[in-house]
Image (cartoon, rainbow, N blue to C red):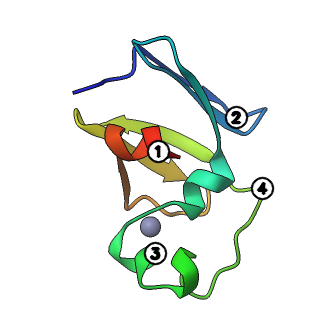
Amino acid sequence: MLVPSRLELAPAEGVLRIDWPDGRRQSLDHARLRQACRCAACRSGPAGAAVGQALDQAVRIVAVQDMGYGIQLIFNDGHDRGIYPWRYLETL
Ligand SMILES: [Zn+2]
């Protein structure tokens, strides 16, 4: 399994940087990650958006929890149910 060699949360820029061992570097918007949440509540909403909630471009990740097979992202809108497996992050 491919596991990032480095993760960097850059709140000022609103991005999460991921370095993969094969040299690829990803830079993912916090808002995009919030939108890409695949937890049951988010998936049941319209077009994958959070139920009754428009995507807020100002949403930020406040904490990252290492789950081994991926990361759990905690957002400043109070959402903390999203688990992002490495395999899924790679596709974003
Ligand atoms: Zn969610």
Q: Are marks 4 and 3 in contact (CB under 8 Å)?
A: no
- Dot placed on the residue nearer the N-terminal end, 3 or 2: 2
- In the image, 77 versus 47, the foreground residue is 47
For residue 18, which numbered disc appears in the image?
Answer: none
Q: Give residue 13's position: percent from left, percent from top.
A: 78, 33
* Residue 28 position (above or below residue 83): above
Q: Is residue 50 visible?
A: no
Please tell me the numbered disc located at residue 58.
4
Marks 1/4: CA–CA distance: 23 Å
Q: Name the residue under label 1.
A: 91
Q: Nearer the viewer, mark 3 or mark 1?
A: 1
**Residue 41 position in % (x across, y down):** 40, 79
Q: How far apart are marks 3 and 1 (CA)?
A: 18 Å
**Quadrant location, the N terminus:** top left
Give the image quadrant in which the ligand numbered 1 is located: bottom left
Q: Distance between the residues labelled 2 and 1?
A: 22 Å
Amino acid type indicated by mark 3: Cys
Residue 60, position in %: x, y? 66, 49
Badge 1 or badge 4: first in the primary sequence = 4
SS at circle 2 = loop
Tell me the residue that label 3 is attached to.
Answer: 42
Whether disc 2's CB lies below 8 Å from ligand 1 is answered no
The amino acid pointed to by label 1 is: Thr
Horizontal placement of 31 versus 8: left or right?
Answer: right
Whichever of callouts 2 and 1 sits on the residue coming sooner in the sequence is 2
Label 4 sits on a secondary structure element that is loop
> Mark 4 or mark 2, which is nearer the start of the sequence?
2
Vertical comparison of 50 with 52: above or below = above
Q: How far is the residue under mark 4 from the one under mark 3?
A: 18 Å
* Total numbered badges shown on the rendered structure: 4
Name which residue lies at 52% across and 60% down.
Answer: 36
Amino acid bearing label 4: Ala
